[in-house]
Image (cartoon, rainbow, N blue to C red):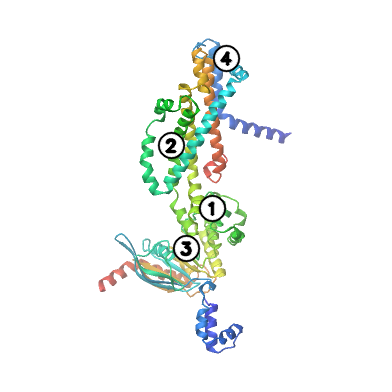
Amino acid sequence: MKKLCIAALSVWFKLTKNLTGWLLPAFLIVFWEIAARNGWISLRILPSPTDIVHAAINLTLSGELASNIATSSARAGWGLLYGGVIGLVLGLLNGLVRPADRFLDTTLQMVRNVPHLALIPLVIIWFGIGEEGKIFLVTLGVFFPIYINTYHGIKTADPQLLEMGRVYGLGPWQLFSQVIFPGALPSILVGLRYALGFMWLTLIVAETIATTSGIGYMAMNAREFMQTDVVVLAILLYALLGKLADTGAHLLELRLLQWHPGFRNS
Amino acid sequence: MSLPVKQISVNPLSGSKPGPVVEMLKDRSKPKITAVKTTDPSTVPGITIRLENLSKHFGDLQVLENLDLSIEPGSFIAIVGRSGCGKSTLLRLISGLEQPNKGTVFYDGKVHNKLNEDVCFMFQEARLLPWHSVMNNVRLGLKKNQFPKALDALQQVGLETRAEEWPSVLSGGQRQRVALARSLVHEPRLLLLDEPLGALDALTRIEMQSLIERIWLESGFTAILVTHDIAEAVALADRVIVLDQGKVDLDLDIDQPRPRQRGNAQLCQLEAEILQRILTAPDASETAAASD
């Protein structure tokens, strides 16, 4: 009996530990509901949480919600893949090969300082309002954080470990795979988390400006009909998807950086 | 250190009881030459080192100046001196990690100018790869079929039970033991130690010293230890070399039986002697410069 109690307690503690982060959002939603029901805020300006749940249920039943989430996620995923691969490859190349660095870095820094969202008019002219334009913008948004952090990770490889590797007869490939790359990985993963933020940001802007499907389209469409509940639902979806992507990246960190004291048992 | 090769070359000439090896040598017309030929360096565990006229400067700073030194195969040499006297630089030149501005390093009579697999280097820091387990750190640079040797080496340093752990959970002394195991799997013929115990506490240091001594006695490699701890130098080395301003200031044989007792009166006296020499060295070199 006593053991059971202790087990139940420890499960409770574990659950609450993981749930701590959700306490504040939950409290805010409850407060919001109360405020809406008592007429403290106009339903035209901000619908109540229950209205949003209703909207979510209706859109789910019609299949609209699922298809819009799928469309947006696909855009985000492809953009992340392209931008991530290009950023990683260029980061590795410029970090490892000095002539490539000298040749490319100036160009990359200039391109980096142009806000990629400023390209939207041009992108619409180039790609129309199809998928390519959005994926292109997400690719651009994701590319730089990954590039910069990969480059930085490679450049800050520990010279003492490199010297040690040479003493123990490691060749260039082994030096890269056993010393340089694992050392750069924490930095690359920071880049990935930044990139995920840029990914959603870019997508939201791209989808609200020129599109015929996706979460952003759903929100813009709802605005035309003053369906504030759907608009707020879209915003919440972005928040949830963003959190989901970040959690994924964090799990990846926990898995790949097990050796790092900073990522143990957290 | 007595070497099998030396005995072979002596026996036929002295005419003592010929063993089978000697008989074999006698069949040849010139036993002396064949005896020299059998001095194939790879059969001797330790490397013979000769430094000729070695000089190194960094910019205007002359670190080593026309240094000559011979080191017997299988011997244990300690290099001591004030900080900045060039002892670490000397070790790096011997290893081939750095190149001298002038002069030559010879291994077994051959010019040595880059790293090779006969030489292992232990640094002041353990320099373990934090993302590899202890075992994989020891396996670094080995081929797959040599992996079993890693476990043997870990056993030698008494850490086989920690094989699967991350280096970050080990203590400083344990990390240096892993670094030692990592050197040992390569079966070095020359082990260079650049103050590897400098950052350890006194007790761990003494343990590590006996561990290094034991392994050196078992394996027979040549060992060169750079240290600022004269007690350590006297406890471990066959010969202590005091460097001062890029030159050999004192070259002292430590003729004491092993295992050496810590606090032994003779060792203490040697230690005091060396310390005295280091502390008074600047004056000595100044007078030397004046008399030139």
Q: Compute the Cα span from label 4 to label 3.
A: 73 Å
Considering the numbered disc 4 on the image, is that residue within a helix, a strand or a loop? helix
Please state which of the two labelled residues, at mark 4 or mark 3, is closer to the viewer. 4
Please state which of the two labelled residues, at mark 4 or mark 1, is closer to the viewer. 4
Which residue in the structure is indicated by mark 1?
B171
Task: Name which residue type carries label 1.
Answer: Ser
Quadrant showing the N terminus of chain A: top right
Q: Chain of mark 4?
A: A
Please state which of the two labelled residues, at mark 4 or mark 2, is closer to the viewer. 2
Crowdedness near tag 4: few (<14), some (14–19) or many (≥20) residues, C-alpha within 10 Å: some
- Work out whether disc 3 and disc 2 sit on a shared chain: no
Q: Compute the Cα span from label 4 to label 1.
A: 59 Å
Q: Chain of mark 3?
A: B
Residue drawn 39% across the image and 49% down it: A98
Residue located farthest toward the right when viewing the structure as drawn = A1
Going from the N terminus, do you reach mark 1 or mark 3 first? 1
Task: Name which residue type carries label 2.
Answer: Phe
Which residue in the structure is indicated by mark 3?
B193
Q: Compute the Cα span from label 4 to label 2.
A: 40 Å
Which residue in the structure is indicated by mark 2?
A144
- Between A91 and B273, the residue placed more toward the observer is A91
Task: Name which residue type carries label 4.
Answer: Asp
Task: Name which residue type carries label 3.
Answer: Leu
Quadrant showing the C terminus of chain A: top right
Res. A51 mark: 4
Residue A2 is drawn in which quadrant? top right
Identify whether B139 is placed above or below B264: above
Left or right of residue B292, residue A122 in this image: right
Please state which of the two labelled residues, at mark 1 or mark 2, is closer to the viewer. 2
